[in-house]
Image (tube, rainbow, N blue to C red):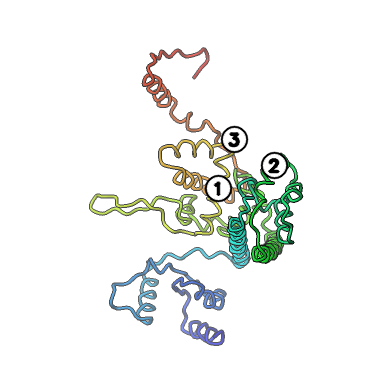
């Protein structure tokens, strides 16, 4: 109880304690942190980093072991942002979970339409668009004629009206209409909750708006991604020695597992899954931008290592860039799509010459006037 934690704080203060260390176990560390934060220097330690020899584990022995490590300076504290950032983090993570609920509802609608022989998803790229929502509302209301429902199409979807007539002709029962109506109402409720949370996030993040605008200069980073990034790493980059340390904390660096001269695995660590997901989404968007370093990096790695490894590499670069942007308060400066070509032009020339020779051509190189 809170009363007991207050007594703990008084007892520690009477004994002249200045530093406290504790394990990070779910959310159970937060009540202790909230009470002791004001009067003590606290280290929140990853339980994985302080494992003991098996067979001697009790709660008391764990406490003694942590205290012993703390006295010898062998503990590394976890990153715990200040209270405003922690509150912002709670909101952005809650929004991400509710967005996942929305995705689950949309997937249920897809399954229901398949069960009702409605092939709307085969014609429209997004069944949650304005046109498709009107059609789904008509189906839920009891409409069975595909002709008037197809005429509800708007914009570019009107060019697919003949296909829509075929797709909307199905085998819809009263059960399908009831479930569809229920899911559409659930979808509206979830979207209203997301909108409400987004409004609250905009209020809480207002003092950090300049940092959000700077993060949005990164390719692939939109307003919601910038909010998520700021909520996870904060604005004080003094917590991380370098951008590479930040990327490692996020789990975007190759793992290190070597024994007897053999490298066993290079799998990335778990890291901060919320931050990793946000920056990975930005990396997918950045890989599709035109004439950028991120696109060049993705195209350079994907053919050799696969698209997923390439996205991790792009996400690593974007996160390191975010570190320097927040640390120096400067906008993103792109290295350009020809960055890798400029690093070693001789090697690039040899590569293309070999490719042409492999195709059966005799290659003779002649430098142009003024060429480097």
Mark 1 or mark 3, whichever is nearer to me: 3
Q: Residue at x 60, y 47 (%)?
A: 122
Q: Secondary structure at mark 3?
A: loop
Q: Is residue 341 left or right of residue 132?
A: left
Q: Return the x and y of residue 9 as percentages of the image width and height.
A: 52, 82
Instruction: Indicate the quadrant containing the N terminus: top left, top right, bottom left or bottom right.
Output: bottom right
Mark 3 or mark 2, whichever is nearer to me: 2
Q: Which circle's residue, 1 or 3, is located before the other in the chain?
A: 3
Q: Return the x and y of residue 204 as percentages of the image width and height.
A: 68, 63
The answer to whether any part of residue 204 appears in the image is no
Q: Secondary structure at mark 1?
A: helix
**Where does label 3 land, which residue?**
290
Q: Residue at x 40, y 71 (%)?
A: 70
Judging depth in this view, the residue of 99 and 1 nearest the camera is 99
Residue 101: name its quadrant: bottom right
Q: Which mark is residue 162?
A: 2
Judging depth in this view, the residue of 315 and 110 nearest the camera is 110
Do the residues under discs 3 and 2 have CB atoms within 8 angstroms? Answer: no
**Where does label 1 land, which residue?**
324
Residue 358: name its quadrant: top left
Q: Is residue 281 left or right of residue 211?
A: left
Q: Which mark is residue 104?
A: none
Q: Residue at x 37, y 17 (%)?
A: 360
Q: Is residue 69 left or right of residue 15?
A: left
Q: Residues within 10 Å of mark 2 (few under 14, many from 20)?
A: few
Q: Residues within 10 Å of mark 3 (few under 14, many from 20)?
A: few
Q: Return the x and y of residue 342 as percentages of the image width and height.
A: 48, 29
């Amino acid at each position: 109880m809170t009363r007991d934690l207050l007594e703990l704080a008084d007892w520690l203060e009477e004994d002249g304690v200045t530093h406290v260390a504790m394990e990070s176990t779910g959310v159970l560390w937060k009540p202790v942190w909230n009470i002791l934060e004001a009067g003590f220097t606290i280290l929140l330690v990853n339980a994985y980093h302080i494992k003991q020899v098996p067979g001697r584990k009790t709660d008391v022995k764990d406490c003694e072991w942590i205290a012993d490590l703390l006295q010898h300076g062998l503990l590394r504290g976890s990153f715990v942002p200040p209270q405003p950032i922690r509150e912002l983090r709670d909101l952005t993570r809650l929004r991400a979970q509710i967005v996942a609920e929305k995705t689950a509802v949309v997937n249920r609608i897809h399954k229901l339409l398949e069960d009702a022989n409605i092939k709307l998803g085969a014609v429209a790229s997004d069944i949650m668009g304005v046109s498709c929502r009107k059609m789904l509302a008509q189906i839920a209301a009891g409409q069975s004629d595909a002709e008037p429902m197809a005429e509800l199409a708007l914009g570019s979807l009107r060019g697919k009206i003949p296909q829509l007539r075929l797709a909307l002709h199905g085998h819809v029962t009263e059960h399908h209409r009831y479930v569809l109506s229920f899911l559409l109402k659930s979808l509206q409720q979830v979207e209203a909750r997301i909108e409400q949370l987004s409004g609250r996030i905009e209020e809480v993040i207002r003092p950090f708006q300049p940092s959000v605008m700077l993060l949005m200069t990164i390719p692939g980073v939109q307003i919601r991604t910038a909010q998520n990034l700021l909520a996870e790493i904060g604005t004080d980059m003094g917590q991380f020695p370098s951008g590479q340390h930040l990327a490692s904390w996020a789990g975007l660096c190759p793992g290190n597992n070597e024994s007897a001269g053999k490298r066993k695995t290079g799998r990335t660590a778990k890291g901060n899954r919320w931050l990793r997901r946000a920056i990975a989404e930005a990396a997918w968007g950045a890989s599709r931008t035109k004439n950028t370093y991120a696109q060049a990096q993705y195209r350079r790695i994907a053919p050799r290592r696969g698209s997923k490894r390439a996205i991790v590499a792009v996400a690593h670069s974007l996160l390191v860039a975010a570190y320097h942007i927040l640390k120096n308060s400067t906008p993103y400066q792109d290295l350009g799509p020809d960055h890798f070509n400029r690093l070693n032009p001789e090697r690039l020339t040899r590569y293309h010459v070999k490719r042409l020779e492999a195709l059966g051509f005799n290659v003779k190189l002649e430098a142009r006037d003024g060429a480097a």
